[in-house]
Image: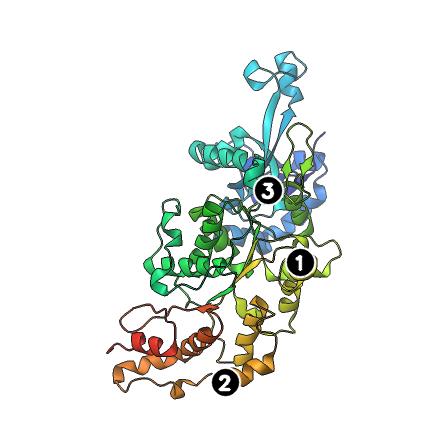
């Protein structure tokens, strides 16, 4: 049966000979086919296949819009990335009846035996949604990304689809809280971690060790580095340590703005061996992700393996990256899936969106089953939370309390008490610094001083690094130490 066509682009495709008749042809993307397999077709064929109305719509649109888009792309009739496979996330044995008939069999033979049975792969195309995924043969995967990349991609797919053994997939108990250690006694937790071909900078390594130390202490963290210092890399290093050194497969949740989702995926794939997925898109896309990316499939029965022998959930992915909008919608839906998952760790990017306790972002995420205090009510291990913010909190005590309250609702239960204890943070002109003119630029660090002062009395929830005129990075344990290390004349 011939599929209905979707006309995308137009070009005057003619024979170069002078006596040849000029024929207009159209570039066609076929329904349920990929951009890799577009073909040039003439008007007669398109009309015969039932595409007359689509053709008329396209012709009307061509002069007004489409041809200008083609010019903007340098003559490309569609975004070339649409023909690049980003991810292979499912596979199946398929019978090509035409090949089987040509081989003179019934299609039960393998490719090597000359029959029509072969493996097809469900491919997500770059910059397109999961709903645009198509089933492709291995040859198409090679054509799209090349032989070497195709081999890596298919090997990764096989690895991620393999159900781990019982010991590997079972979440281990979190270690007991250890006594507080001095800074000089804190172990180099990440020294034995492997981040593919990457290396952490010294201040990033310090940040990851600090995040791990707080995890050991069962204490959430606020990573408040300035923009550009690699907060994403540090958070990635932290969950990679959990994965490598503690055999913790997650699931880990990353909540971030849509604009930085690609960066999160790139960093996790570039620094770790974890299976990271992006849960976003239209309903059809989210359904495809849930169907193929959430659970393992039993190779014998073809059914999803959703629970272990003890009844606990088994997830195929290690890291799920999503947006604030998806989080809020999921919590409001009766059939929401994210809010019910027993997350092992939750990383919140742009965490200043939690600065209002009554906001929908705050209440939606705190309403997740694994987030304290809900975890206490559901009798499950609470998720370890890391909040990331490079945006100043405007020296507002209430905003800082909201973040701390999200991390530790019992320890920071009362706003009035918190404000009475710490008051309002000092303004830049009130920060006690040395009188050297060279230190004037350090007045912008009043927020860092305030956070560090709070950190001294709030069980080390906040870490911030900042630039000075000498391009050093700071991590201090008290306001005085911050002042001492910030001043270039110190």
The colour style of the image is: rainbow
Picture coordinates of residue 44, whole percent (x, y): 67, 35
Closer to the camera in the image, 63 or 267: 267
Residue at image location 49% in from the left, 61% down from the top: 217
Picture coordinates of residue 280, whole percent (x, y): 61, 53
Residue receiving disc 1:
369
Q: Which mark is residue 424?
A: 2
State the separation of the CA atoms marked 1 and 2. Answer: 33 Å
Residue receiving disc 3:
316
- Which of marks 2 and 3 precedes in the sequence? 3
**Where on the picture, by quarter, is residue 444?**
bottom left
State the separation of the CA atoms marked 3 and 2. Answer: 46 Å
Q: Residues within 10 Å of mark 1 (few under 14, many from 20)?
A: many
Closer to the camera in the image, 355 or 100: 355
- Which of marks 3 and 1 precedes in the sequence? 3
Residue at image location 39% in from the left, 75% down from the top: 478
Picture coordinates of residue 198, whole percent (x, y): 36, 48
The reply to whether residue 436 is visible in this rendering is: yes
Q: Quadrant of the C terminus?
A: bottom left
Q: Is residue 170 above or below residue 66?
A: above
The residue tagged with tag 3: helix, strand or loop?
loop
The residue tagged with tag 2: helix, strand or loop?
loop
Residue at image location 49% in from the left, 76% down from the top: 393
**Which circle, 1 or 3, is nearer the viewer?**
1
């Amino acid at each position: 049966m011939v599929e209905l066509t979707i006309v995308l682009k137009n070009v005057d495709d003619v024979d170069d000979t002078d006596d040849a008749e000029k024929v207009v042809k159209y570039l066609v993307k076929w329904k349920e086919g990929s951009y890799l397999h577009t073909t040039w077709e003439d008007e007669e064929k398109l009309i015969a296949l039932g595409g007359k109305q689509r053709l008329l719509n396209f012709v009307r649109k061509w002069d007004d819009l489409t041809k200008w888009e083609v010019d903007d792309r340098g003559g490309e009739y569609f975004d070339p990335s649409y023909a690049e496979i980003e991810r292979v996330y499912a596979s199946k044995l398929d019978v090509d009846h035409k090949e089987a008939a040509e081989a003179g069999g019934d299609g039960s033979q393998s490719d090597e035996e000359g029959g029509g049975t072969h493996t097809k792969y469900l491919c997500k195309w770059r910059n397109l949604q999961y709903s645009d995924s198509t089933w492709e043969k291995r040859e198409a995967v090679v054509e799209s990304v090349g032989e070497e990349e195709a081999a890596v991609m298919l090997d990764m797919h096989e690895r991620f689809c393999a159900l781990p053994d019982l010991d590997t997939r079972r979440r281990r108990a979190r270690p007991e809280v250890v006594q507080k250690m001095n800074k000089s006694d804190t172990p180099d937790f990440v020294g034995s971690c492997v981040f593919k071909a990457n290396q952490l900078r010294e201040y990033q390594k310090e940040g990851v060790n600090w995040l791990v130390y707080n995890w050991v202490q069962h204490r959430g963290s606020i990573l408040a580095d300035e923009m550009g210092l690699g907060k994403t890399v540090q958070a990635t290093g932290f969950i990679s340590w959990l994965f490598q050194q503690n055999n913790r497969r997650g699931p880990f949740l990353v909540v971030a703005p849509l604009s930085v989702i690609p960066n999160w995926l790139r960093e996790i794939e570039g620094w770790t061996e974890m299976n990271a997925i992006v849960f976003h898109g239209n309903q059809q896309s989210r359904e495809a992700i849930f169907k193929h990316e959430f659970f393992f499939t039993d190779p014998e029965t073809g059914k999803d393996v959703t629970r272990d022998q003890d009844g606990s959930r088994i997830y195929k992915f290690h890291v799920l990256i999503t947006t604030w909008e998806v989080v809020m919608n999921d919590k409001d839906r009766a059939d929401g899936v994210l809010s019910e998952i027993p997350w092992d760790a939750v990383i919140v990017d742009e965490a200043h969106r939690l600065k209002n306790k009554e906001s929908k972002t705050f209440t939606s995420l705190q309403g997740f089953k694994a987030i304290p205090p809900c975890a206490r009510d559901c009798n499950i291990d609470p998720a370890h939370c890391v909040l990331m913010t490079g945006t100043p909190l405007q020296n507002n005590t209430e905003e800082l309390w909201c973040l701390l309250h999200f991390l530790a609702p019992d320890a920071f239960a009362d706003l009035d008490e918190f404000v009475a204890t710490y008051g309002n943070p000092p303004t830049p002109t009130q920060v006690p610094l040395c009188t050297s003119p060279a230190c004037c630029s350090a007045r912008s660090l009043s927020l860092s001083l305030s956070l560090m002062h709070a950190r001294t009395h709030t069980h080390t929830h906040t870490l911030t690094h900042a630039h000075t005129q000498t391009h050093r990075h700071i991590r201090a344990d008290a306001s005085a130490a911050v002042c001492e290390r910030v001043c270039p004349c110190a």
